[in-house]
Image: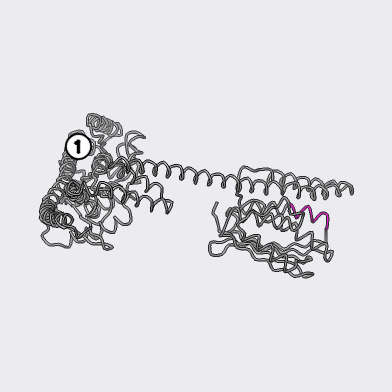
Amino acid sequence: MFFSLRSRLMAAFSLLLIVPFITLVFVLSEESTKLIKQSIETSTSQTIEQFGSHVNTSMTQVEEIGNQVMSNRVTQEWITAQMSPDSSVEERLLAKQRLMEYVSSYSINNSSGISIGVFSDFGGGVWTQDRTYLEQDWYTRFLEEDKRWTEAHSDPDQADTIMKARLVNSYMLPLVQLQSFTKSGFVKINYPTSVLRDAIVKIKFGKTGRAFLLTSDGTSVLDQQLPEDSLMILSSGLAEIKAAKGYDTSGVFPIRRDAETYLLFYRYFEEQDWYVIGEVPEKELFVKIEQIRRTMLFISLILLLLIILVAYWLSSGITRPLTSMARAMKHVERGEFAQAFSMMPAVRTGHSEVGYVTRVFENMTTRLRFLIETEFETNLRRKNAEYKALLLQINPHFFNNTLEIISGLAAMKKNDVLMDATEALGQMMRYSLNLNSDLVKVKEEMNYIRDYLFILQLRYEERLHVEIEEDLASNTLLIAKFILQPIVENAVKYSLEESGVAKISLRVKTEEDRLHMVVADNGIGMDAELVDHLMRELISTDSVDILNSGGDSIGLRNVLSRCRLYYGEQLKVSINSKRGEGTEIRISIPAVKG
């Protein structure tokens, strides 16, 4: 009992031990959390700085190449030949050939895949003379705003097709004849976008945090795909950086969006007017801290539990495993066997009698789970067999009537009509004999109905009037096979028996994620007792014995039974019928997309 001396001493001992220990763990975890957060932020900022150094090194190399190419003697001779009206065609071609050899040699010797383009105001690029660059955004910005560093784009003025196909970023500088200081074109140093993009995509923070290289207006420099959520966060962060006066060229700051805090790490490149920004949810970046805290608390709890278990070992050697086994029994009672088995190892120690009871309970639970799963599989197979039996029963019942129609056409020697009827029958046979799938599209079922009605129209001519309203949006939905045909067949049969003229209405439409099918006729109708009997069979938990129904509404029973087997409680059916006035059957099922 709790009020026993031993229990009270154990409770006081545990309280005096737990309170100081938990306080110590809490203080240490808080201080360690602060230190680890600072370390993580510093490490993340260093990652951004490392990428920034890579960008600076690459851009400096590209800029130096541009200056060397522009001031090179070969380049100056070519532009002089282009500008001079006294230069002959041979001199211009020779100067161009030398320039092409020079830039080709420079590109080949460069390990970064850099290519060089030289453009003259007189004749376009040195490689293709393609003047389409005049319409490109990067050229317009260079010309009007002196933007020398471009975003990712493709450049057709390249030495080969491989270079033309790849994305490049470029550094552009004016091409000046140094003798007269006359601007006569520009030099374009292309470097593969992948040089920087391959490096930046490797930068990851947490689970979803990524880094992006952006222009000052928020455009991706490296053609990176920015998710919509990230784009909004980056745009807000970029605006905040630019709005701050005297901000540092690098740093980290938080930003709130949708009740969640994000950390933005940035580095600004003044010469290029670029920003590299890393974005990550704060909780993802510090997830390991939380894991460490939880681990510390967990270890502390385990240590406390071990102490308590030692103190209570004599008294709890029996009650503890029995309590755990009781919890497992609650899971078994709810049918949660996986959770129950997960608790079994905790109750296997203790007295031999308790261990024996535990093992018996585990074996019993395993056997119970096996029996339940076996029963479930047996019921599933039985219902599938019932469905196949109901589906196969349609074929002889329907094709017997159809063959009588074709026989009548042959007797009347209507050969052309007979060929059409035979073709329609062939299409129906292919459709009905295909049992590979229990589901078909509404369009396929409606085509089957039209073939069937075509044959009936040949036989009954003016005695059969059919009105079909079909919602085209329903064509691609899936339904169980042969739902409509038996109902339409009964509607035609009993309408001809009643008045000699069958007026059939078939409507199919989709509303509010449900497919509605309505078949109405002017037949003999049904008694209220029969309608009530059919509806009771529909909601009954026992299968309707179609094979022993004796022909009493077999077609409708077949449809309703198959629909109940397939759709269960989601099936909605209504039957409005009066003797001598006709019948209207409404079937509503979930709209299942194909």
Q: Residue furthest right?
A: 412
Residue 262 horizontal/vertical position (percent) = 23, 57
Main secondary structure along the magenta-highlighted residues: helix
Q: Is residue 378 visible?
A: yes
- Kind of residue at disc 1: Val
Q: Is residue 276 visible to us here?
A: no
Relative depth, front residue between 342 and 189: 342
Q: In this picture, which residue range is highlighted in magenta?
A: 452-460
| Relative horizontal placement of residue 271, taking residue 467 as reference (left or right) | left
Measuring from the top left, give residue 82's x and y in whole percent: 26, 39
Name the residue located 54 percent from the left edge and 54 percent from the top edge: 593
Q: Quadrant of residue 345?
A: top left
**576 with respect to 242 (left or right):** right
SS class of the residue under badge 1?
helix
Q: Position of residue 413 (x, y in %)?
A: 88, 47
Give x and y (percent) for residue 182. Answer: 19, 46
**How many residues crowd mark 1 within 10 Å: few (<14), some (14–19), many (20+)?**
many
Q: Quadrant of residue 487?
A: bottom right
* Nearest the eye: 485 or 121: 485
Residue in the foreground of this view, choosing between 306 and 297:
306
Give the residue drawn at x 26%, y 58%.
233
Residue at point 34%, 33% (across, down): 160
Q: Is residue 238 magenta?
A: no
Q: Quadrant of the N terminus?
A: bottom left
Residue 236, quarter of the rendered image: bottom left
Vertical comparison of 587 with 135: above or below: below
Q: Please name the residue that numbered disc 1 is placed on.
A: 69
Q: How are the colours assigned in the image?
A: one colour
